[in-house]
Image: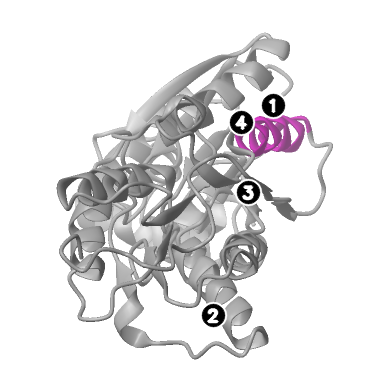
Amino acid sequence: MTIAVIAEEAGVSVPTVSKVINGRPEVAPETRQRVERLLHKHGYQRRVSPGDGPVGLIDLVFAEIESPWAMEIVRGAETAAREAEASVVISVLHTHAGPGRDWLERIAARRTDGVVIVASRLSTGLQGQLSARSMPFVVVDPEGEPANGVASVGATNWHGGLSATRHLLELGHRRIGMIGGPGDMLCSRARIDGYRAALETAGVPVEPELIRHGDFLVDSGHDQGHALLSLADPPTAIFAGSDMQAFGVFEAARQRGLRVPADLSVVGFDDLPLARSAWPPLTTVRQPLQEMADLATRMVLAMGRGDSAEARRVELATDLVVRESTAQPSLTPSSSQW
């Protein structure tokens, strides 16, 4: 498929199609959309000339960057980029809908060696636009199920949820609260499914009132922690879908006069550096964030060199790290505290 064929079908000139591919601004929006639809429809791939070598830039695109979680991703990407003598350019979209056309045109205009998209949705339209511009891309921790042909790197979230809940069950807890992330996020659903599987395997009923949703940040852990501890029969343990949420649960417990872990056991997810220095140190599921970003960046660089012929989906292992925020349930909790 050539630019000339795309131009003929779109009813425009060859230079106009070239401007769309290269992110030039002087194209009418309706014309741009018509050309992009045809580029995606025909699976157009820009021919790379001998002079189009690496430019030494990797684009790292976040939906949000408000958490230490994002900093771990940055460190991993920078490690891989530095070894390849490249630099990392960070973009923050402030939306989980994925990169938009304006962002894409800016990147096309200045060129990049590849794009690592973090915790965002990736529409088939955007996938086609990236491919048409010969931009290698990998999704880290995708929000939804990646489309066929999209390379992605994630973690074994289901197993992490299973191991966290199983740990609490082995300590003797039977009323275990769960605070997940947004209900439509793939990683959150997987962690909750692992939680459910552990309970069902142990013969413990799954109670909907014990499952809450937040946004993986401290405030949602605090608010949903209060909601769980306000139940007539509150949980003796809470599994939070992120370390930041777990810290919010810590604060909710403190405000209610509860001690962690004497009165309430808490497990997080991520194993951020803060987890080790929290008080008490947080039992958590280690998600290899730096390794995920490092691998995704290496995959993008390899795709740019033509070394990776097929997209891959990779899930790195999670591990439970037991510290001091979990213990056996108290036999006689004070009713005034609850």
Q: Are marks 3 and 4 in contact (CB under 8 Å)?
A: no
Q: What type is the residue that disc 2 sits on?
A: Arg
Q: Are marks 2 and 1 in contact (CB under 8 Å)?
A: no
Identify the residue under disc 3.
45
The span from disc 2 to disc 4 (Cα, nearest Å) is 28 Å
Is the C terminus in the top left, top right, bottom left or bottom right quadrant?
A: bottom left
- Of the residues under marks 3 and 4, which one precedes in the sequence? 3
Where are the magenta residues, as a range?
Answer: 290-305
In this rendered view, identify the residue nearer to me: 276 or 2.
276
Q: What type is the residue that disc 3 sits on?
A: Gln
- Of the residues under marks 1 and 4, which one precedes in the sequence? 1
Give the answer, above or below, for where 335 lies relative to 70.
below
Residue 196, numbered label:
2
Q: Is residue 265 magenta?
A: no
The span from disc 2 to disc 3 (Cα, nearest Å) is 44 Å
Task: Give the foreground label among 1 and 4.
Answer: 4
- The residue located at (30%, 71%) in the rendering is 212
In this rendered view, identify the residue nearer to me: 13 or 284.
284
In the image, residue 134 lies at what x, y percent?
A: 60, 41
- Of the residues under marks 2 and 3, which one precedes in the sequence? 3
- Of the residues under marks 2 and 1, which one precedes in the sequence? 1
Q: Dot 3: what SS?
A: loop
Identify the residue under disc 4.
290
Q: Is residue 52 visible?
A: no
The span from disc 1 to disc 4 (Cα, nearest Å) is 34 Å
Residue 49, numbered label:
1
Q: What type is the residue that disc 1 sits on?
A: Ser
Q: How many residues crowd around disc 3 within 10 Å: few (fewer than 14), some, or many (20 or more)?
A: many
Task: Give the foreground label among 2 and 1.
Answer: 2
